[in-house]
Image (tube, rainbow, N blue to C red):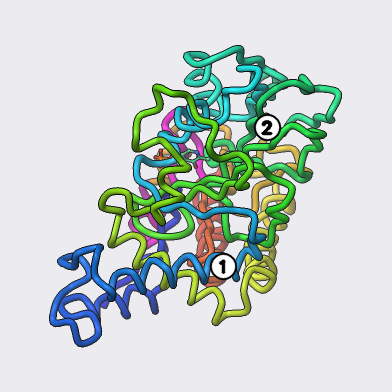
Amino acid sequence: MKRVYNFSAGPSMLPLPVLEKAQAELTSYGDTGMSVMEMSHRTPEYEAIIIGAEKSLRELMSIPDNYRVLFLQGGASSVFSSVCYNLLTGSGKADYIVSGQFSKKAYKEAQKYGDIRLAASSEDKNNTYVPQITADDVRPDADYVHICFNNTIYGTKYNYIPDTGDVPLVADMSSCILSEPVDVSRFGVIYAGAQKNVAPAGLTIVIVRDDLLGRCRPDTPVMYDWKLMADNGSMYNTPPCWPIYIAGMVFDWLLENGGLESMKEKNLKKAGLLYDYLDSQDYYIAPVEKPYRSMMNVTFVTGNPDLDKKFAKESTESGLRNLKGHRSVGGMRASIYNAMPVEGVEKLIAFMKDFAERNPK
Ligand SMILES: *Cc1c(COP(=O)(O)O)cnc(C)c1O
């Protein structure tokens, strides 16, 4: 079997033991004689899968009892709208921090629904850092403050949890969820598309404090009504059955491997190897300011677009896939989510050294 080191930002690598278990169970799950893909979501077997997945996620993230976990469809991008339907109903005001492309998309989408203010932005320096904000920077009567906790495209991450006073903090954690422990109680809502660090595409996880439910706009599309979804155990309609099944196995794989503390240790090690190398030489440039470096998405450039192109091509040929940066920023990006082994990062560094020697500037 050939497996490459896949540095894709998403959809991205999944743990091999999970893929192998899915393979073993592909045509018959347990003694059901059918695949999970063929199974009604209204069967006891499937109920056990979805309930088990939620239970494991709660344990993994230490999610307090007053938070509900929703398994939805639509991608993280659908939450850019649904958060407005669900929360923008008090003062109708929300404050957004723009620190990259996804937070900007969220900010733009929200403008359709209320009085949306840009509280801070890092666009002045091409999103190479994350704005520092305090409770004084947000409107005290805002319905929520929205941030993107890890900026997948630029490779930056919040190195603090903003204090927003009594205003609920809503965080897009699509590309950092489960990479390290996080104090869920500091957030009103945490959401994530699953295809970065959790499961195949098609599943969107929303973790919401229960006092924020039940106040959605009257014209809320039924599929965006988080309370309805919560009341129905995410099964008001057919849930994304297969991605939830895989996600459950990923949660269990994480629990079996020491949980998020040990995942953080492993991720720090991987990112540390790469950043230490980047800091030790001057062939590659890492544009992100050090305190805001992402542990999941590491960006760098040679400074020469032709060399960047050559790097992408030759690394692909060496079995290191998807290192090309996002089409909007160019350069290179190594996404090193939980499933990327340390050896993948070591191979990448060896390739980077070799490439630099062979292609003097
Ligand atoms: C990938 C990504 C998104 C978009 O996710 P979809 O599931 O494709 O809608 C949003 N936010 C962040 C931080 C992402 O990394």
Q: Which mark is residue 128?
A: 2
Residue 253, position as x, y percentages in the image: 49, 76
Q: What residue is pinned by disc 1? A: 346
Residue 361 appears in view: no
Find the magenta span and give its range: 313-333
Magenta span includes 330: yes
Kind of element beneath mark 2: loop
Magenta span includes 291: no
**Left or right, residue 133 beside residue 48:** right
Kind of residue sitting beneath label 2: Thr
* Tag in front: 2 or 1: 2
Residue 246, position as x, y percentages in the image: 36, 67
Q: Earlier in the sequence, mark 2 or mark 1?
A: 2
Kind of residue sitting beneath label 1: Glu
Residue at position x 22%, y 70% in the image: 36
Residue at position x 33%, y 70% in the image: 3
* Above or below for 144 versus 313: above
Q: Quadrant of residue 62?
A: bottom right
Q: Are marks 2 and 1 in contact (CB under 8 Å)?
A: no
Residue 314, position as x, y percentages in the image: 38, 52
Residue 191, position as x, y percentages in the image: 53, 45
Q: Report the quarter where the N terminus lies.
A: bottom left
* Above or below for 360 versus 84: below
Residue 48 appears in view: yes
* Above or below for 100 versus 228: above
